[in-house]
Structure formats: C-alpha cells, structure tokens
Amino acid sequence: MTTHTRTLGTTGPQVFPLGLGCMGMSALYGDADRTESLATIHAALESGVTLLDTGDFYGMGHNEMLIGEALRTAPAARREQALVSVKFGALRTPDGAWSGYDGRPEAVKNFAAYSLQRLGVDHLDVYRIARLDPAVPIEETVGALAELVEQGYVRHIGLSEVGAETIRRAAATAPIADLQIEYGLLSRGIEQAILPTTRELGIGITAYGVLSRGLLSGHFTADRQLAANDFRAYAPRFQGDNLRHNLTLVEALRKIAEQKGVSVAQIAIAWVLAQGEDIVPLVGARTRERLDESLGALDVTLDAGDLAAIEAAVPADAAAGERYAPAMMAHLDSER
C-alpha cells in the first residue's frame, strides 16, 4: 500500500492520502457500535492514517469524546501521529434538532474550549466553522480563529462548504489550510468555480461524501430500510425514482471496477484521489472491514482510459436529487 503523503494546501500539515471521517460513529447514520468504532480508529492509525475528522455537534459532543478515548488508548506513537480536524458552529437543541450556526468570535473561542476538553488535547490541528453564519462576516470568524492560532490552541484554519467569494475573503484575513466540501463522482459542483479558486490560492481540499453517503459503496440496495435516526431516510438522492436512477449509475461503475478487479467503493475513492494531489478524501468507514476496503483504493491506478470510461459511466451532473434536503441546502454558501 502507498505510503506517500499529501499536504493540506501550501500552509497546512502533511497527511496520509486518506482521512477518516468519524461522524457516522456517533450520529446521522443510525446506531453505531462503540467497540467497533474505537477498533476502527485504532486500525486506521495503525495503517498510517493521520487525519481524523469530526464536528463538536456530532452526537452533541459524543464523537469528540469517542475520538478522545481512542487517542488515550492508542499506543503513544500512533497517538502522536494523529491530526484532529474539528468543525464547530452548528447549534442543536436537546431533542437533536438543528437551530442555525454561530460564527461570532466569542462563540468560536467558547466552542474551541469545549472541544479541547472533550478531545483531551492541548490544541486542535485544523479548526473550521461547519457552515457560514450569514449574520457574521467571515472575516470576523476567521479573525477569531487566527487569534486561537496565535495563542497555540489551533494549528491551522480550515473552511467548510463555502463558495469562491467567501474563500477569497477568508484567505485575505488569515492563511487557510483547506476547504472541507463534498466532492465525488456524484457531487462535482466544486469543479466550476470553487476548485479553481482554492488552487489559485494554494488551499487544499478535504473531500467528504466521496461515496455519496454510501450510494457509491457498492453495498447499498434499493430495498434497504433506513432507520429513523439515519438522515439518508430523508435525503433526496435516496428517495424513490432518484434512488433507482442513482443505483443504475452504481451498476455502470461496477462493471468498470470488476474489469480492474477492484470494488465499486475502491474505484470511486481512487477517482477522487486521481483528481489532484491537493485533494484528500475522507472515508466514513465505521468498521474495520470497510476501512480495509477503503484503504485498498490507494493501490488502484487509473489511466486515461479508465478515467474516460468512468466519466462515460457517471458523467458530471448525472446524479438524481440534491445532496441534502432543502432546509439543509439553504445553509450551503457553496451552492449559491
């Protein structure tokens, strides 16, 4: 398996070419197995993975505490290699509902204090607001992050799901390591304006949703029943005719994968890896089995013929349905 690294932009850290997205271990994809989650984080670190991605609102702090426990119980060498990327700003209610975003400087510092405690660390490696707060200029939010960098509580500043204009304003305020945003075969919107902007400014991409919430995993079926606490049960791409259409794209991709002797998930991840050294895919593996499959993508080489075949099978804008429900899409500065 490859051992080379990628760098998060021109100012960010060097990382293993795949990161582990930990959200599903605590929330939004139905129930998770705590023991297996911890074992998966440990296995990721043992395999060389360095970047662990979370949000302080994943399970209302549960995910940070889970990662904190995983780090405490990992061998010292593995613990020291870990880089934790944290999103903040999403407001929740006791029943789990979403109630907006808070990017005020005083809120930024408050969120950071709680994350440091839950994770059991003395600094956050990458820190970013999850969604733009429309009531607070991005310059104020990033300015507060820059103060945390100066004080040693944050190493690098990131952005999440913002558009080209916001990226430019943020980068004019302080150095930005990376933009976290959905990018994969079924979500290619960043290619128009966002990706050219980040490349111009030397900002990396940490891509989530590379398997489109499991649609491109090769394991999702049309008759699968999703639990009430699985947000995909309400996501447009998983509904009715949209789901049936999207699964036909998966089958077209499966034919190419089988010709190369790899899985659908592996070829989908490999496609994202092939889009540039400035892109680090986050894989949301919740089990060691899925982690191993994802890591196998690092050994998949796609030549020009492979890339052309994949493009023909799953063209840009081929997916049916938006990537989020309307209420969540409204919070995406990246979609404006």
Image: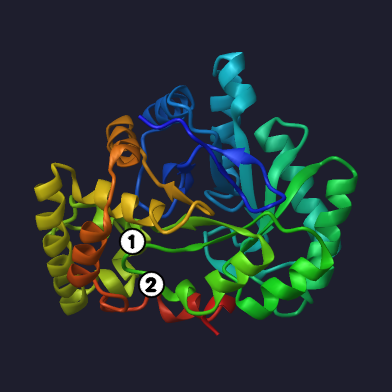
Residue 142 shows in this picture = yes
Establish if 217 lies above or below 43. below
The quadrant where residue 67 appears = top right
Specify whether 114 is left or right of 280.
right
Residue 133 shows in this picture = no
**Label 2, residues with CA under 10 Å away: few <14, some 14-19, many ≥20:** many
Name the residue type under label 2.
Arg
The quadrant where residue 52 appears = top right
Image coordinates for residue 45, horizontal then vertical, percent: 49, 27
Residue at 68% in and 47% down: 12
Residue at 41% in and 59% down: 275
The quadrant where residue 44 appears = top left
Specify whether 163 is left or right of 296.
right
Seen from the viewer's position, the closer of residues 334 and 227 is: 334
Specify whether 145 is left or right of 333.
right
Q: Which secondary structure, mark 1? A: helix
Q: Which residue is mark 1?
A: 212
Mark 1 or 2, nearer chain start: 1
Name the residue type under label 1.
Ser
**What label does residue 323 carry, if any?**
2
Seen from the viewer's position, the closer of residues 98 and 12 is: 12
Establish if 117 lies above or below 202. above
Whether the residues at callouts 1 and 2 have beta carbons within 8 Å, the answer is yes
